[in-house]
Amino acid sequence: MISITGLTKSYNSREVLKDVDLRILPGEVVAIIGPSGAGKSTLLRCINMLEVPDAGRIHVDGRQVFYTPNARGKLGVLDQFRLTWLRREISMVFQQFNLWPHRTVLENLLEGPVISKRQKRADAQGRALEKLRSVGLEDKADAYPADLSGGQQQRVAICRALMMDPKAILFDEPTSALDPELVNEVLEIMAKLAKTGMTMVIVTHEMKFAREVADRVIFMEHGGIVAEGPPDVVFQHPRLRVYASHLSH
Amino acid sequence: MNISEPGSVAAEYFPIFLTGALTTLGIVAAAIVCATVLGYIIATLRLSRIRALRIFAAAYVWFFRGLPLMLSLFFFYYTKPFGLTMDAFTAGLIAMSLNSASFFSEIIRAGLKSVDTGHLEAADSVGMNPLQKFVRVTAPEGIRLMTPPYINNCIIMLKESAQISVITVPDLMLQGQKAYNSTYNVMETLGVVAAMYLVMTSLLMVLQIVIEKKMGRKMGTTKQVREAVRSMA
């Protein structure tokens, strides 16, 4: 589904990703964990080119992603036009939700399919309401994001990602900006989604969630992958146990 | 006609004042359009990645923001810049546009910069191209923040347009001056002119309140907008 080889990325001569290889299979749920500054989010954001790597090959669904970073390490305008296909195949859920504040919940869900994929509004609207129902927010269709709690906003953001009918969804610390009591409502929906066979790559600090829901856990430190494999195995890794013991303090 | 009778001067000159007011409205409207377009260009230059363009734009803003409008008016009307002879209306329009563009560019720059990067990345993440991203996210979010200071600046332009009377543009101010020069009834002539200016600026103020209220309600974030606006002013 997603295959990455030799991914390298630096910010001002500080190496954030060092020659990273990663393979994601269809239907797989992969959790990326590790201390802050390990390069987890950068790796995730390189998959859909929100950050542009300095070197390395990326294939998505068998198709190679060609890119050239501009001076700021982002995509140039031409590449943004050229790579819209990539963003339509791989959705993203952000730490800060990033719903558009000037549009209602329903409009937020329709932007992707109607504006970007040029689907019929009426069809998309039916699907959007269905998605909202599945996360228990059907009564919020006409509300503005500012009227919702963080947990509700993130559930809407997950619906927005699903509206693209993506081949995979990237989650960038989806619960880190939430009040503790709102974390579970989002994790529950992600767990449900994992059961449907959606391909998911999740950067998270929720160890329990990673352990219970992920098919595979990747532990990163200092821009490289230290350990990867089934949760039970990776959580026994000595480096991860050091990290986990820091977390519990 | 007995000009000592109260109200008679105002009544006699009212049609002339009206044509003056129309001239004022015309030149201000044209200047707002030109200054907005130019201001937008200067703003994008100032946000450019190319250093030389940024410096040019900053120099432009520094120059015109720091010069009296009156000086620019005299310059374009009396010095015949680059051998160009122009009528008073054109000279006034150019001077006002160049002058106001410096203010508009700052307002537009602040508006564009305040658009949340995350909201733009969200647009990327659903596969919008740069054009769609601008129309669907950058413009609506930016305009919401720009509107209050933008209209405020339009009000200032309308008032300061009175200065073009000095280079003989037959605007409302000049018609008022002519009227009191020939009647010596300053109170009555300038009183009517003042009322007409107030009507025009009031309309803009009402427009500002209506737009602010409408956007504030829709967004549910009036407070946020107000704070952003305050930080811009």
Image (tube, coloured by chain):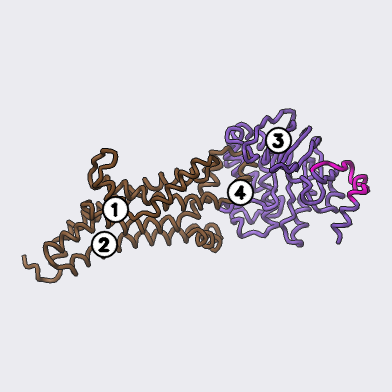
Residue A8 horizontal/vertical position (percent)? 75, 37
Position of B60 with respect to A125 (left or right) is: left
Position of A149 with respect to B72 (left or right) is: right
Residue B117's disc is: 4
How crowded pointer 1 is (Cα within 10 Å; few <14, some 14-19, many 20+) is rated as some
Residue under label 3, please give it: A54
Residue A17: quarter of image: top right
- Name the amino acid type tagged 4: Thr
Residue under label 2, please give it: B196
Chain B on-screen colour: brown
Query: Label 2's element?
Result: helix
Q: Nearer the viewer, mark 3 or mark 1?
A: 3
Residue located at (74% from left, 54% from top): A175
Residue B25's disc is: 1
Instruction: Give the CA separation, mark 4 to mark 2.
Output: 44 Å
Q: Are marks 1 and 4 in contact (CB under 8 Å)?
A: no
Q: In the figure, A170 relative to A151: above or below?
A: above
Chain A on-screen colour: purple
Q: Which residues are magenta?
A: A223-240
Chain letter of disc 3? Answer: A
Instruction: Give the CA separation, mark 1 to mark 2.
Output: 11 Å
Q: Earlier in the sequence, mark 4 or mark 2?
A: 4
Label 1 and label 2 in one chain: yes
